């Protein structure tokens, strides 16, 4: 198993402090963005529209919460890594006897926790517009954590891979954003033409959001067990890949 | 300052056949070097010699293309955690994390080494580096020289038995440089092994017991500082002849260099001073000025680096 060792706690604490110090940008700003999405989309698309027998605004909330979790988890690990690479301060983490398992664990857990904090914030500010309590809180939490961990892992890969901020932006704009937007955040995939429904089933983010929505409503496009299996598999694969890259020192130790 | 105990016979640092290539370029070309425990060791060489690359390989930041490196017997790749626990490195680049204060930076760094409550030692380091009044200042608000001293502090939080400083005094003012050296010397006296690179040769001369001279990834010379000085430098005599007179032909072979009207003669033995003066008297030459110069590392450095260059 992973040998976390002494450095894990310190690295995790440092990563958490890093975003919490600038919570205005890292938490408040994305919460506000999600709230604007909710107000605009529900206004434009009409309150009377029903999806899965739910008011559209209510349907939209879990999708927005999950989208915020995912995007912020990715942003946390990727921007922390690229910043410390560009400034050179990553050397402080590379010199101590921190195992690659501890390195990975700390960055991913911090990313998932930032995702959860932002997600929680989004859910709280949408309460006045769409009072919504999760029917299956454990399912919701499991998908939020796993989704955050997956995107946090992608963020680790992207942050290590990118040498410049615009490369990171490309990763975000051409991979993360399309995957999250085209995953059923704003609609049920049953409203899509058959072809796009089929395509959606190849998008792992679809399962994260569908499973998370199940946690709120107890209904979903796919069974939650299936979604959980897909998401777990996805996480395991990405985690293994990242650990392998870190063990080799890919792009970190030259 | 309890350094972890290792048998004295184990070298503090051992490089064996270390090669580092960057594509077709060879930055380290087979470095063999052992540094004993407790030594104050100097790693000198011109820009681009490979000093930082060698230190990066030692610290595990870079991986050698061939060869192996041990810190107190622990291989830096295979046994990296044990090796890194014993090593404190002050990087050459002035880097810092802008999110934290000086004390936070040092606490976090302690945590990376698995040390939880370290404030007593942190305070001692801060006092010795004259940073105590900056403990709660954000890193961004420090001057360049202060940031450099925090880098030194960061390398010391885990009391490493082997301390490597890659140009720690660049940009640090004279007074603090003295203070820094007093502190490093004290650590050395307490048993810590010190490996230092610097371009201030007087510093190396004053501090280091042994010196390796690196150029183009190869060790050109490796000896005690005293021997290096004796072998490559010796005394020199600076003369300024009065008027437009020429040096007698018999003294030409001793000429090391000319500086306008000044001539610097290399003396392999101090007694040669008398021979020189006798020749001048015989030729009936008058002197405007005369200075005897003690051996210094700069001469040794120039002799070695220059000799290599003329072979190339
Ligand atoms: N990452 C790298 N990629 C390619 N070449 C490199 C890399 N790092 C160093 N080099 C080259 O290796 C050589 C040695 O560089 P190094 O930084 O070790 O020199 P140095 O002795 O520390 O010099 P200085 O006194 O200027 O600090 C240089 O020619 C440098 O250009
Ligand atoms: Mg250097």
Image: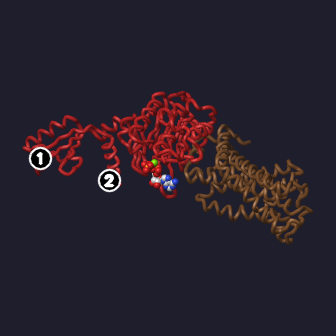
User: Residue at 14% of width from left, 48% of height from top?
Assistant: B247
User: x, y percentage for residue B150?
Assistant: 51, 40
Per the model, the C-alpha gap separating discs 1 and 2 is: 33 Å
Residue shown at 39% from the left, 44% from the top: B213
**Color used for chain A?**
brown
Residue B310 has which mark? 2
Q: Is residue B50 visible?
A: no
| B88 shown above or below B253 | above
- Pointer 1: what residue? B242
User: Visible in this render: residue B190?
Assistant: yes
Q: Residues within 10 Å of mark 1 (few under 14, many from 20)?
A: few
> What is the crowding at mark 2: few (fewer than 14 residues within 10 Å), some, or many (at least 20)?
few
Say which of B57 and B125 sits in front: B125
Chain B tint as drawn: red
- Label 2 resides on the chain identified as B
Where is residue A94? Give x, y as percent. Answer: 59, 45
């Amino acid at each position: 198993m992973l040998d976390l060792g002494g450095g894990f706690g310190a690295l995790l604490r440092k990563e958490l402090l890093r975003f919490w110090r600038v919570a205005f940008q890292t938490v408040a700003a994305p919460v506000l963005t999600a709230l604007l999405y909710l107000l605009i989309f529900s206004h434009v698309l009409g309150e009377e529209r029903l999806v899965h027998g739910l008011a559209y605004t209510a349907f939209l909330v879990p999708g927005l919460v999950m989208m915020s979790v995912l995007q912020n988890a990715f942003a946390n690990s990727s921007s922390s890594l690229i910043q410390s690479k560009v400034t050179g301060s990553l050397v402080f983490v590379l010199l101590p006897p921190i195992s690659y398992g501890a390195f990975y664990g700390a960055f991913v857990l911090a990313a998932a926790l930032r995702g959860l904090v932002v997600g929680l914030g989004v859910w709280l500010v949408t309460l006045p517009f769409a009072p919504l309590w999760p029917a299956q809180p454990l399912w919701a939490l499991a998908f939020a954590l796993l989704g955050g961990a997956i995107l946090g892992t992608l963020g680790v890969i992207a942050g290590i891979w990118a040498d410049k901020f615009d490369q990171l932006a490309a990763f975000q704009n051409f991979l993360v954003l399309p995957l999250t937007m085209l995953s059923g955040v704003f609609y049920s995939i049953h409203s899509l033409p058959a072809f796009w429904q089929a395509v959606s089933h190849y998008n792992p983010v679809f399962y994260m959001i569908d499973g998370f929505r199940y946690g709120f409503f107890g209904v979903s496009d796919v069974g939650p067990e299936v979604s959980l299996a897909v998401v777990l598999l996805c996480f395991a694969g990405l985690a293994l890949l990242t650990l392998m890259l870190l063990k080799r020192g890919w792009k970190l130790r030259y | 300052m309890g350094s972890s105990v290792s048998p004295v016979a184990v070298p503090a640092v051992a490089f064996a056949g270390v090669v580092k290539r960057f594509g077709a370029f060879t930055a380290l070309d087979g470095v063999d070097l052992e540094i004993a425990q407790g030594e104050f060791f100097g790693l000198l060489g011109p820009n681009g010699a490979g000093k930082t690359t060698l230190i990066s390989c030692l610290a595990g930041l870079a991986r050698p293309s061939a060869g192996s490196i041990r810190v107190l017997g622990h291989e830096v790749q295979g046994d990296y955690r044990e090796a890194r626990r014993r090593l404190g490195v002050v990087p050459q680049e002035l880097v810092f994390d802008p999110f934290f204060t000086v004390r936070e930076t040092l606490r976090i760094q302690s945590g990376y080494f698995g040390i939880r409550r370290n404030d007593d030692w942190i305070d001692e380091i801060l006092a010795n580096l004259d940073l105590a009044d900056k403990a709660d200042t954000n890193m961004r608000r420090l001057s360049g020289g202060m940031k450099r001293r925090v880098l030194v502090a960061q390398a010391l939080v885990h009391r490493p038995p082997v301390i490597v400083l890659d140009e720690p005094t660049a940009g640090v003012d004279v007074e603090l440089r003295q203070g820094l050296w007093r502190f490093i010397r004290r650590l050395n006296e307490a048993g810590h092994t010190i490996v230092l690179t610097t371009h201030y040769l007087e510093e190396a001369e004053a501090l280091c017991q042994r010196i390796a001279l690196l150029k183009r990834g190869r060790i050109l010379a490796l000896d005690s500082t005293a021997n290096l000085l004796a072998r490559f430098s010796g005394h020199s005599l600076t003369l300024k002849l009065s008027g437009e007179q020429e040096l007698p032909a018999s003294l030409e072979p001793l000429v090391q260099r000319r500086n306008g009207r000044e001539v610097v003669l290399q003396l392999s033995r101090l007694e040669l001073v008398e021979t020189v003066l006798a020749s001048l008297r015989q030729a009936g030459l008058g002197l405007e000025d005369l200075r005897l110069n003690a051996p210094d590392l700069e001469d040794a450095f120039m002799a070695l680096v220059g000799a290599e260059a003329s072979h190339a």
